[in-house]
Image (cartoon, helix red, strand yellow):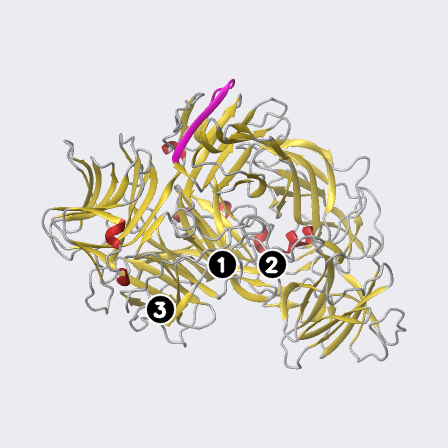
């Protein structure tokens, strides 16, 4: 079919108050996703066989049917050596020479596993990661090698499966929805875990990391998921008036016979009503996974439930109904209808009832009454509800059932984005959130919603892009300058038709020191010439990167110059046009060629294969320049151009830091490390270094880490988010002693008022069970920290109920159970508790632990290293021998009563206490990820993903800098990219 051109970017509001992508996206996507020639292609999640197109990852349009409706997903879409491959789960694949087809008839193939994700490693070797049903009928993640997109080799190998004691095996060990990517020399394997139904609410996305995709194992899993439901965050944000049964049971009166009289009002006289614990429903499991909130059986067609409550803290400012129900529901408060719905809400959802409930609340003697109905043929019956007060916070929908993550490059070539499936307030949808790398650590800034507060802008545009649209006439000639050759716009591309001599086209942009330049190239089917790009030109010299397909070589050289070109063989994985079986002849395809300029270092990729995987091209080039196209003795076609000013660097190849553009000299002693990046090692006096082209808008990110946390020392470290000159700059510094982020600076020669904000924060963590403890009758729980930190408090929410998958029942610890914590100092030692120092968490006695809430655990502030903090809970308990339920803690030597026995939770089937969530309070950390965004009228600063400060001011075009004052530290994972204004 004809080429699609959409380069008219939609201007999205850039106000800072709650800026977000606007999740969920307007359309449900399947998860198959491909970026090709300036456009994104994805399969529709609601209509089988339909493909959509976008140029910004947010607005999806132009649906085209590419497969029969009978061919259902999940799908996978891939491009390899000239052909597009569309896989359908368990049904085979189809091929085409254009992303939207037409596709050939589906071919059955013995491809292993479900939920396939095809990828290539740094050398172009082809693999897939898949879900496969394991021996216990639960999902495991396996890897399959490929000789070609249609042919597997060897048997698949298992990479990951569910393990007891981790968050990813709580209600089932069902792993699925795998995704894999390569970044900065590491491979990241994402997977969804726990039962996939939104009714259970536990499906989240985890991560494993390794430097070799063939060596992934369960030990590579991160302790916490990277994409979590937002229920806990909202529960911490909103004030709980009446808890729902998701975390703990609640008592209510109910009946399954239609009540008489004003049963919704206070003072109602009950007759025939029963008392039960919410929620109510049947069955109490979904696909073998227990519904833990289903505590009282409801099997009839209707149920009437009422809860009495008081409001001792006063009336709610913005009351919210939190509810999950199957079938129709009607909710009243003190007799007034506040919510009605005929549509099931299969996941817990929030609804604003402030208008409907205006004037109905009282400080005492309130009644919330619910009537729920289900069809006789309905598979499920369920009702659970609660009340919250949002106060001044925005109302957000809940996000549950996170699954099928795909990581894709943003339109500017620098950003990475996570596209995923989830349920927003019980409605299926797709979300899009930003991916960051805190050094080596992958972090997803989500899930966000349209109402999420903070700075979550949509994908950034490139500094320049060009798809040479057919209706552009001669507009392309105004965007490029030419030297030799025969250039013309034709068929939605820029063609160079001369087959002899040298032809060059240069991008008409301001020269820059750092940029990404990508184009799609159609090589001629035959000929001895070379085609490629001008990686850099200063008007006098050009750095040429060219490819000769006939000779299967590529080379780079500077011209004019005396040095011979550096020539290399093309990777074996690259083919100009491969031929799948049963497919006829095809036209020469487009191949993606990318160069990156980071100061004097250049990177080169061909179809995603790094042509110099060990190191970049290191030159003596020290001046800015522009990129372009190149041909010698060959015709060619160029399309899909992306150009973005900026860079991404890490490790030993960080380069270009030094003197500022205004002449300000660097200071300190700087050296490079392969794993830790750029170190400023001077322990006294200032250290500073500057880099970058002068840009008016940009995003600057860097991970800054101390060798060790030295609390009490008067040392500072941080960044210059803005440095135009000595009269126009911003300096953001971490003050470890004061435990503050301090921002100072000047604007037009006038000092701005210094600003500071506390570094204290609360970080939520999931549990991680560790059996390596050498203590008897102890269950240990570990909460990993990013870096050495001062930990001042723990808040714990406990699991409750019977988890059949784990063969364990969890209970709230008794008042006299001593909870202890440890400062873990493992270093490289295998024994988790080695050198650990233990203290009673509460003195002189422990606090009572309550159901369903975060319980504060007072601890002595201690420095914890990169491993984290841990808890151990003495687990010798007395249980009822008939039911296995907890009765009390066991005191050694005591006599047991009738029907009592000692329970020990170190066994596989027992009763125990286990935290569901820990909120760790950090006073200060030894590693901070700075994200600094310079806009026209302000600068936004985030630390470790949390909003820290916004400083108003119209600073001129600027560079950025690294800075220390008497504090050695490491700077790594440094990136910056231009943020063009709308219309540029």
Q: Residue 838, how many percent across, how many down? A: 70, 33
- Dot 3 or dot 2: first in sequence order is 3
> From the viewer's perspective, is residue 712 above or below residue 347?
above
Q: Label 3 near label 1: C-beta < 8 Å?
A: no
Q: Is residue 689 magenta?
A: yes
- The CA span between labels 1 and 3 is 23 Å
Work out whether residue 947 or residue 148 is closer to the camera in this orientation and state it.
947
Task: Please name the residue that numbered disc 3 is placed on.
Answer: 92
Q: Residue 182, how many percent across, how many down? A: 39, 47
Task: Please name the residue that numbered disc 1 is placed on.
Answer: 420
Residue neighbourhood size for the residue with mark 2, other residues' Cα within 10 Å, grouped as few (<14), some (14–19), many (≥20): many
Quadrant hosting residue 776: top right
Q: Which residues are magenta?
A: 681-693
Question: Is the magenta region chiefly helix, strand or loop?
Answer: strand
Q: Secondary structure under badge 3?
A: strand
Q: Label 2 near label 3: C-beta < 8 Å?
A: no
- The CA span between labels 2 and 1 is 16 Å
Work out whether residue 615 or residue 639 is closer to the camera in this orientation and state it.
639
Q: Residue 59, how many percent across, how many down? A: 44, 62
Q: Secondary structure under badge 1?
A: strand
Q: Residue 466, how many percent across, how many down? A: 31, 54
Task: Please name the residue that numbered disc 2 is placed on.
Answer: 202
Describe residue 174's horizontal placement relative to residue 862 as left or right: left
Q: Secondary structure under badge 2?
A: loop
The answer to whether residue 574 shows anywhere in this view is no
> From the viewer's perspective, is residue 499 above or below residue 349?
above
């Amino acid at each position: 079919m004809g080429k699609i051109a959409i380069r008219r970017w939609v201007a999205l509001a850039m106000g800072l108050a709650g800026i977000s992508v606007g999740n969920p996206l307007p359309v449900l996507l399947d998860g198959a996703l491909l970026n090709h020639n300036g456009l994104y292609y994805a399969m529709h999640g609601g209509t089988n066989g339909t493909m959509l197109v976008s140029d910004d990852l947010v607005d999806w349009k132009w649906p085209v049917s590419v497969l029969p409706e009978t061919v259902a997903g999940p799908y996978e879409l891939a491009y390899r050596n000239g052909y597009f491959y569309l896989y359908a789960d368990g049904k085979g694949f189809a091929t085409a020479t254009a992303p939207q087809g037409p596709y050939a008839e589906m071919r059955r193939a013995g491809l292993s596993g479900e939920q396939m994700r095809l990828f290539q490693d740094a050398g172009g070797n082809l693999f897939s990661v898949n879900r496969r049903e394991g021996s216990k009928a639960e999902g495991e993640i396996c890897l399959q090698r490929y000789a070609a997109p249609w042919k597997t080799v060897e048997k698949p190998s298992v990479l990951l499966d569910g393990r007891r004691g981790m968050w990813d095996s709580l209600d089932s060990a069902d792993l699925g929805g795998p995704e894999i990517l390569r970044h900065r020399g590491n491979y990241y394997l994402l997977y969804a875990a726990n039962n996939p139904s939104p009714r259970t609410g536990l499906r989240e996305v985890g991560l494993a990391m390794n430097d070799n995709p063939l060596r992934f194992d369960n030990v590579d899993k991160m302790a916490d998921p990277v994409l979590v439901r937002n229920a806990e965050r909202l529960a911490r944000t909103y004030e709980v008036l009446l808890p729902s049964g998701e975390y703990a049971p609640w008592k209510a009166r109910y009946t399954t016979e239609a009540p008489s009289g004003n049963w919704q009002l206070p003072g109602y006289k009950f007759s025939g009503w029963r008392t039960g614990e919410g929620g109510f429903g049947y069955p109490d499991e979904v696909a073998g996974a227990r519904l833990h909130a289903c505590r009282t059986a409801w099997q009839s067609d209707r149920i009437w439930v009422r809860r009495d409550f008081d409001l001792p803290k006063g009336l709610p400012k913005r009351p919210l109904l939190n509810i999950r129900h199957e079938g129709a529901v009607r909710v009243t408060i003190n007799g007034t209808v506040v919510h009605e719905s005929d549509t099931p809400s299969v996941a817990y959802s929030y609804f604003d009832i402030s208008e409907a409930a205006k004037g109905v609340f009282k400080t005492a003697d309130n009644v919330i009454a619910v009537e729920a109905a289900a069809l006789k043929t309905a598979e499920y019956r369920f009702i659970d509800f609660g009340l919250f007060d949002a106060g001044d916070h925005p109302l957000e929908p809940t996000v549950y059932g996170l699954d099928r993550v795909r990581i894709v490059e943003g339109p500017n070539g620098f950003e990475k984005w996570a596209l995923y499936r989830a349920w927003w307030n019980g409605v299926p949808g797709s979300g899009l959130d930003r991916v960051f790398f805190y050094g080596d650590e992958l972090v997803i800034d989500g899930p966000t919603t349209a109402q999420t507060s903070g700075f979550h802008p949509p994908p950034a545009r490139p500094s320049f892009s060009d798809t040479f649209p057919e209706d552009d006439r001669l507009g392309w000639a105004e965007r490029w300058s030419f030297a030799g050759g025969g250039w013309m716009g034709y068929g939605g591309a820029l063609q160079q038709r001369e087959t002899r001599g040298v032809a060059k086209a240069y991008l008409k942009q301001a020269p820059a020191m750092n940029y990404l330049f990508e184009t799609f190239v159609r090589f001629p089917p035959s000929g001895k010439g070379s085609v490629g790009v001008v990686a850099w030109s200063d008007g006098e010299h050009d750095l040429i990167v060219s490819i000769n397909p006939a000779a299967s070589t590529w080379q780079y050289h500077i011209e004019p110059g005396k040095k011979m070109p550096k020539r290399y063989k093309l990777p074996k994985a690259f083919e100009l046009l491969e031929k799948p079986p049963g497919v006829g002849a095809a036209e020469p395809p487009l191949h993606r060629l990318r160069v990156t300029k980071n100061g004097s270092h250049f990177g080169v990729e061909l179809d995603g294969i790094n042509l110099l995987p060990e190191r970049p091209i290191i030159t003596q080039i020290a001046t800015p320049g522009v990129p372009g196209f190149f041909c010698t003795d060959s015709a060619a076609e160029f399309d899909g151009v992306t150009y973005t000013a900026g860079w991404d660097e890490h490790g030993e190849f960080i380069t270009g830091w030094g003197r500022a553009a205004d002449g300000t000299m660097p200071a300190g002693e700087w050296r490079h490390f392969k794993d830790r990046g750029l170190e400023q090692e001077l322990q006294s006096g200032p250290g500073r270094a500057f880099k970058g082209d002068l840009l008016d808008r940009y995003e600057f990110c860097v991970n800054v880490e101390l060798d060790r946390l030295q609390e009490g020392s008067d040392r500072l470290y941080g960044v210059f988010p803005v440095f135009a000159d000595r009269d126009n700059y911003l300096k953001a510094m971490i003050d470890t002693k004061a435990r503050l982020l301090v921002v100072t600076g000047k604007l037009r020669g006038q000092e701005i008022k210094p600003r500071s904000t506390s570094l204290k924060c609360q970080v939520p963590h999931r549990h991680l069970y560790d059996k390596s403890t050498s203590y008897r009758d102890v269950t240990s729980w570990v909460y990993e920290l990013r870096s050495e930190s001062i930990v001042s408090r723990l808040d714990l929410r406990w699991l409750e109920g019977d988890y059949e998958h784990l063969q364990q029942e969890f209970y709230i610890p008794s008042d006299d159970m001593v909870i202890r914590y440890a400062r873990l100092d493992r270093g490289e030692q295998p024994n988790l508790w080695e050198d650990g120092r233990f203290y009673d968490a509460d003195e002189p006695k422990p606090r009572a632990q309550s159901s369903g809430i975060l319980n504060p655990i007072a601890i002595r502030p201690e420095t914890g290293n990169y491993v984290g903090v841990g808890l151990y809970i003495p687990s010798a308990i007395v249980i009822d021998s008939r039911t296995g339920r907890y009765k009390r803690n066991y005191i050694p030597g005591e006599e047991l009563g009738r029907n009592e026995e000692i329970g020990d939770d170190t066994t596989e089937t027992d009763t125990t206490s286990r935290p569901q969530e820990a909120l760790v309070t950090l006073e200060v950390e030894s590693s901070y990820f700075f994200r600094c965004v310079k806009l026209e009228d302000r600068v936004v600063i985030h630390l470790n993903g949390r909003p820290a400060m916004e400083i108003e001011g119209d600073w001129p075009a600027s560079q950025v800098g690294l800075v220390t004052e008497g504090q050695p530290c490491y700077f790594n994972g440094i990136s910056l990219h231009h943020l063009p204004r709308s219309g540029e």
